[in-house]
Each structure stands twice: as structure tokens, then as C-alpha cells.
Amino acid sequence: MFNKVLIANRGEIALRIIRACKELGIKSVLVYSKADEDSLPVRLADQAVCIGPAPSTQSYLLIERIISVAEICDVDAVHPGYGFLAENAHFAEVCKSCNITFIGPTPEQMSAMGDKAVARETMKKAGVPITPGSNGIVDTEEKALTIARKLKYPVIVKASAGGGGRGMRTAHNDHSLVQAFHQARTEALNAFGNGDVYIEKFIENPKHIEVQILGDKYGNVIHLGERDCSMQRRHQKLIEECPSPSISPALRKKMGEAAVKAAKAVNYSSAGTIEFLLGSNDEFYFMEMNTRVQVEHTISEMISGVDIIKEQIRVAAGERLSLTQKQVQLTGHAIECRINAEDPYRNFAPCPGLISFYAPPGGFGVRVDSHVYCGYRIPPHYDSMIGKLIVYAPTRQEALARCRRALEEYLIEGVQTTIPFEQFILDTKDFREGNYDTGFIERLMKDGLFEKKTQN
Ligand code: MV4
């Protein structure tokens, strides 16, 4: 096992990793920016080293500085968390060349999934269902038109280098396809330095279902069931739950097996997530793989009892997975609400600033993963997450009640938060009935009910 691990991240995930290291008897070194010097992870890590000013391009993204700290502190491994360098194959390669274990997939595994058109082809070959679409990239307007007409509209043009909703355009006819094709290519070239695009049949109002995967370096891969991440706004997830209320045990088994097949197709050997689109007739399609630990990994931990971060560190150190698929027992129901410093009444505008009062909820089945405390100032330079509220209960109904109770108990003053909006969602009939898809929040906002209800 590692003696010392460097954490190349900030916020709640840095703290989450520090906690896992402590329990494994591993010393932690945290690199941080000037803007984060007062954060909890800086206090709780065994060692913390300031690597630059607030902008992440001058701190959390500076590979040379992070590697310098890793060498000076003589760490065995680096944990990248999520965001920043977590899916940067070059960083993983540099770590390797410096004899530092990157706690994550190999650069090859990462690259195999980083290019979405390549990933799609790999999945097709492996027999994982994909949406009907082009074979690889589409490089001319004429080819785009031929493919789109064959698929029948609507279609979606996606950037190979995109992901997470970036660099996509839908088209409902020939005219809009030509526009979408050129726009997507230009946008992709500007954003990623790679203008390659491919085309898929557009699945309307899909559900976003993702499966948590764990692999080791001996070819073993298991899954910890799915998470329903359909409750999102502009590709920002707000509430996640597992198991999904939209999935039968039979479908769960099928998706779990497809996810394991997907991970095995790239020899995957870390924690990862296979994202699927779920259509209206239980048909599901591979969307993309996230080759990192995700914000919402916590809910899978609650229903499986597996500490995903500890497992990820152990397999990176060369240990075998501590359990087989048969030993995975999924019990109960977990819900996560992301608590962001945003004003839901003002189009979710970020609200960084001083947290003047802070009392997180507690009690049976309640977990809060957060790096903040009363008197902490949320810096304006990064994402606006204050923390994650995770509740666990034997049934969905009890989890909903517990979630409502905990949101009400969660007292935060000084900044606006997403709590009122999440309370509103939790009280909608459709959410309570498990009846929602990726279009839910947009439709809710159109109805204007959130605003009205709160003004009275
Ligand atoms: C799609 C789709 C419909 N049909 N692909 C958005 C994130 C990126 N990973 C892929 N995304 C989508 N791909 C086909 N063929 C709809 C989306 C999509 C979406 C997916 C998951 C969660 C929220 C979403 C919101 C809008 C669009």
C-alpha cells in the first residue's frame, strides 16, 4: 500500500480523499491555491503546499508544479479527484514517467474513452448497445445529410472531443442539419482544438442512467448498480438517486452487465462510470464513459456499503478488488442533493461569499460531504458547490421523507443556495412518483411554478 498520496484537487472531493487516506493509514499531501488556504481540506491534510494563485490555470492545472511537490514530498501516488486534471491523459502519462502512481485509469484507457467517436466504435465492437448513427466521424456536409436522412430526423451532431453536453447540436431537418454540422465543428475546433464530429439519432427526453464500475489490474470488473442522474439543469446535475425509480430488476441486470462489458472492452482498472441514455421502451444506449470518480459516487456507496475511494486507492496500489459481483449487495435507497451557492430565483447565478451561519443536518441516515464551515468564504474562482447532502433509507419513500427533513434542517446564511429549489422538486407529484427525465427541470421552469409559489 502507498505510504503517501498527493491530492491534486480542492473542495469536498479533496476532503473525501483525505478521509479515505486516513482510514487506510496513508499520509496525505494537498496542493492548494491561495484562494483555498482557509478551506477545511488544507487544515485536515497531513501536509499542504500552496502551488499558486486562485486561477486554476495558475494552480490546479499546472502539471509541473504538482509534480514538483510530488517529488519534493516523496509521494507514491497522486489522486486527481474530478475535474481539473482527472481526465487528462498527458498528466497520467507524466505521473507514470516520474514513477508516481496515478490513482485512476492508465493513459491508454483514458484516451480510449476520451475520444467519443472512438469510444462509440469500441462499444459497438464489444456488443454494447449504442444509438443508431454514423460509423465514426463525419467530415463533409454531404455525408452528414445522407446519414441524417437515413437515420430520420431528429438527429444530434456531437463533437468527438466533447462530452458532458459540450459541443452538441440537434437538427430536425436538412436545413438545420447543415447549420448544426458547421456550428458543431467550429465550436469543437475552438473549444477542444479538434473539429471532428459524428452523428446520432436524437433520443427525445431520455433518462440519464449511469452505472458505477470498479476494475482492478487483474482484469476483474464489477458494477455497483445504477444512478439516476436525470434531474439536471443545463447539464448540471442537481439531485441524483439510486436505485433508479425507472428501472426494473431485469433491466438493472442488463445495464449492469452491459456496463461491465464496456469497461472490460478497454481493460478498465479503476473507478469509472458508464453513462447510458434510457429511452421510453426500456431501450438503452451507451453515451460515454467517465474515467474518474464522480461527484455522485456517494449514493452508490450508501446502497452498496463499498467505499469507492478506498477501493480506487487499493486497486491503484495493485490490490485485487475486495469483493466479487456476487458479493455486491445493493440495499435501500439513497438520494443526493447538490447544495450550490447559487440563487435559484435568479437563474442560478453563482453566489460566492461569506457563509455567516452554517448548521448542517444530521441524524439517522444523513451524510454531508462538504469542505465548508461557519465563517468560511466561498471563493468566486471555482464551481459553486457548498457540499452534498446524501440521505439513505430502506425505501424510496422513506428516503424522500428523510431528504425533505434534512434539507429543512440545513441552515446556511450569507449566500443563496439551491436548497429551496430542491425542496420544491422534492414536493412535486412527478418526482415523488419517480416520473422524471432529463427535460424535467426545463419544463418546470417554463411552467413558472417555482417562482410563483415562493412569492406568495
Ligand atoms: C444524446 C441525447 C439524445 N440523443 N444523444 C448530453 C450529455 C452528453 N453526454 C450526451 N447528451 C445527450 N446525448 C442522443 N443520441 C440527449 C442528450 C442530453 C442529455 C443527456 C443526459 C442528461 C441530460 C441531457 C440533456 C440534454 C441532452
Image (spheres, rainbow, N blue to C red):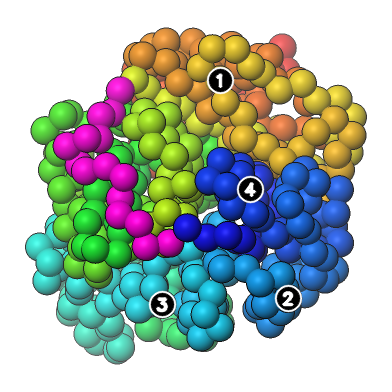
Q: Residue at x 44, y 39 (%)?
A: 307
Q: Which amino acid does the dot numbered 2 rest on?
A: Ile
Q: Secondary structure at mark 2?
A: helix
Residues drawn in magenta: 317-331
Q: How many marks?
A: 4
- Rendered image quadrant of residue 159: bottom left
> Can residue 9 be spotted in the picture?
no
The residue to which callout 2 is attached is: 72
Mark-to-mark CA distance, 1 and 3 = 37 Å
Q: Which amino acid does the dot numbered 1 rest on?
A: Val
- Residue 366's label in the rendered image is 1
- Residue 18's label in the rendered image is 4
Mark-to-mark CA distance, 1 and 2 = 39 Å
- Residue 328's label in the rendered image is none
Within-10-Å neighbours for mark 4: few <14, some 14–19, many 20+:
many
Q: Secondary structure at mark 4?
A: helix
Within-10-Å neighbours for mark 3: few <14, some 14–19, many 20+:
many
Q: Which amino acid does the dot numbered 4 rest on?
A: Ile
Q: Residue at x 63, y 48 (%)?
A: 18
Pair 3/2: label in front: 2
- Does 313 sit above or below residue 163? above
Mark-to-mark CA distance, 3 and 2 = 24 Å
Pair 2/4: label in front: 2
Q: Which amino acid does the dot numbered 3 rest on?
A: Pro
User: Residue 232 magenta-drawn?
Assistant: no
- x and y percent of residue 168 in the render? 42, 66
* Relative depth, front residue between 354 and 19: 19
Mark-to-mark CA distance, 2 and 4 = 19 Å
The residue to which callout 3 is attached is: 107
Decide which of tag 1 and tag 2 comes sooner along the chain.
Answer: 2
Decide which of tag 4 and tag 1 comes sooner along the chain.
Answer: 4
